[in-house]
Every structure is written in structure tokens, then in C-alpha cells.
Amino acid sequence: MGGRHPRGCRPRRTGEGANDGRLPGHTWRAADGPAIPSTQEDAVPVIVVKMLEGRSVEQKRRLVREITDVVVKFTGAPEDQVDVVIEDYSRENWAKAGTLFCDR
């Protein structure tokens, strides 16, 4: 799974064993500009929420709004760079303590 690059930038590999651009500490090369060192703060936050299906679209809207607000507040990331992914699972595909939720 490849990482996302800042618009107009791509990782520049340098030296033997240079990382693949998905880890902090690599160097970004703007298409028409100087190299930009990457730091942990440059990483795009991606939050994955895994839950049982059944929530309404409105509940999901409120959830992603609140998650985004908290991530922006505590990381300083720009709001438009915060990705939230919701993964809904059916009760037949999730188990706890050895029992499927559909069997509870």
C-alpha cells in the first residue's frame, strides 16, 4: 500500500537502501523546486474506524466530524488533510470471545 505524497511532490531515493517514501525522515522532491525534508508532522493522518454495521449516515457524519476536529486540535494537521475511513462489518463477520455477534 503506497503512501500519499504532498501535491506536486514525490519521494526521492538517495543512497543504498533508501526508504520507499512511506516513513518519516525521507526527502520530498517538488517537481519544480528544492528537496523538502519530511518530518513526522508532515504525515497525513488517516483514522480507520471499524464497527458493526447499523449506524445511520447522520451518526457517521457526526462521528467523522468529531474525529476530524480532535485530530486537527491535537496534531495541528490541516483539516483537509485528515482522512477518516469507516469500515462497517456485518454481525456474521465479527466475533467476540469465540462467538459471532449474529449468534448472541
Image (tube, rainbow, N blue to C red):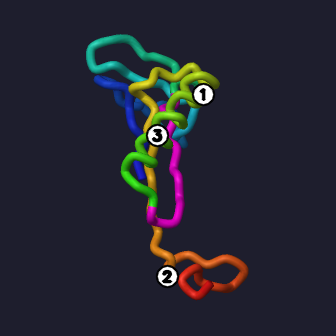
Specify which label sits upstream in the sequence, 1 or 3: 1
* Residue at x 39% of width, y 37% of height: 4
Which kind of residue does numbered mark 2 sit on? Glu
* Residue at x 42% of width, y 28% of height: 81
- Mark toward the viewer: 1 or 2: 2
Which kind of residue does numbered mark 1 sit on? Gln
In the picture, measured across the screen, residue 75 lies left or right of residue 64, that is right
The residue most toward the right is: 97
**Marks 3/2: CA–CA distance:** 26 Å
Q: Position of residue 93 (x, y in %)?
A: 50, 78
Q: Mark 1 packing: few (<14 Cα in 10 Å), some, or many (20+)?
A: few
- Mark toward the viewer: 1 or 3: 3
Q: Which residue is mark 1?
A: 40
Q: Which residue is mark 3?
A: 62
**Marks 1/2: CA–CA distance:** 38 Å
Say which of 86 and 29 sits in front: 86
Which quarter of the rendering shows the C terminus? bottom right
Label 3 residue SS: helix
Which kind of residue does numbered mark 3 sit on? Arg
* Residue at x 57% of width, y 32% of height: 24
**Marks 1/3: CA–CA distance:** 28 Å
Magenta part of the protein: which range? 43-54
Give above or below for 16 relative to 97.
above
Residue 18 on the magenta segment: no
* Residue at x 51% of width, y 19% of height: 37
Label 1 residue SS: helix
Q: How many marks?
A: 3
Q: Are marks 1 and 3 in contact (CB under 8 Å)?
A: no
Q: Position of residue 80 (x, y in %)?
A: 39, 26
Q: Which residue is mark 2?
A: 92
Q: Position of residue 66 (x, y in %)?
A: 53, 34
